[in-house]
Amino acid sequence: MFWIIVCLIAGTLMLYFGSEWLVRGAKGLALRLGVAPFVIGLTVLAFGSSAPECITSIVSSDTPDIIIGNVVGSNIANIGLAIGLAAIVGPMAAKYKDMRMEICVMLLAEAGLCLISILGYIGWFEGIIMMLLLFVFLFLVFKNKSSDKEGQEAYVEEVTEDTLSSPILVALVIIGLVLLYFGAKYFIAGAKDLAVEMGVSDMLIGLIVVAIGTSLPEICISLIAARRGEADLAVANIVGSNIFNILFVLSVGSILVDIPISDSMLTFHLPFMLIFAVVMFLIVKFTNKIDRKTGVLFVGMYAVYIAIMGMFPSLMI
């Protein structure tokens, strides 16, 4: 058990620092290439914080239950924990008109995942379709946001603070990717051994242990952004990350290996993920804010989700 804990902690730390350095390096390189700061913040930050999930999916190609559990569990944790805790730390303004396309795409991506899961598995064909949809989304983001002066001003201070030279930025990207790979490798090794030790399924480990571990970048970024009063950054990070988790992370995993969908995943975990997205969508649309009460609601919903799994062991299979 000692080495299991060491693997989980070491893997988590490498995932965290790997994603941090990858985001910093990629953001700096994108700026030097003349990409609009707002586009950098929305796409690079979301991709960087989803990178642990992606690397985990690649490393877990021999255990597809961990892949789907990781994606679904991470999307639930992103709203239930990352947004919930961030809102408790600092109430956030979330203007629907500024993120209408992104939050609608998140909702549609999660609803679409629920629908295709009825097939009983997600294969390479569905993976390619999801990857193509991601490219369409990124094109629309770049087209709609690249000329957004207000959005650029929101990120320009953060981006221009990065004055590192190009070689250092490239080194950060490379080191970040290496840390992500080995972090995922150690974390998954520990998670698999933990599943055997506790006698639980790979899917459950993916839904809780791996999902929370790979969601640490999103949770940390959102908490820091909320404390600094950068509400748009916190919310956009989660919305973008949830989109990337499905259209990128899950697509990569399903292209590598067919991902089976269990009955409990189809009837409980996926609907719960969609409920979180719908509740967030409705709150943002009709209140234009995520206050402390909403934060408590999200954390409470996550606690209920975990409690239900504890009461009904069949949901862990």
Image: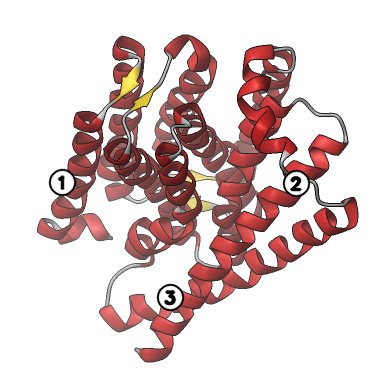
Q: Position of residue 277 (x, y in %)?
A: 35, 29
Label ID, residue 26 = 2
Q: Position of residue 163 (x, y in %)?
A: 80, 46
In this picture, is 296 found above or below 77? above
At a point 74% along the width and 36% down the height, the residue shown is 160
Secondary-structure class at tag 1: helix
Q: Which residue is mark 3?
A: 192
CA–CA distance in space, label 3 to label 2: 31 Å
Kindly report which numbered mark, 3 or 1, lies closer to the viewer in this rendering.
Answer: 1
Q: Residue at x 58, y 39 (%)?
A: 46
Image-based side of 256 in relation to 209, left or right: right
Q: Earlier in the sequence, mark 3 or mark 1?
A: 3
Label whose residue precedes the other's in the sequence (3 or 2)? 2
Relative height, residue 283 to residue 7 (above, below): above
Q: CA distance from mark 3 to mark 1?
A: 25 Å
For label 1, the crowd category at 10 Å Cα-Cα, with few meaning under 14, some 14 to 19 and many 20 or more, is few
Q: Residue 36's quadrant in the figure?
A: top right
**Mark 1 lies on residue:** 304
Of the residues shown, which amino acid type is indicated by label 1?
Val
Task: Point out the frontmost of discs 3 and 2.
Answer: 2
The amino acid pointed to by label 3 is Lys
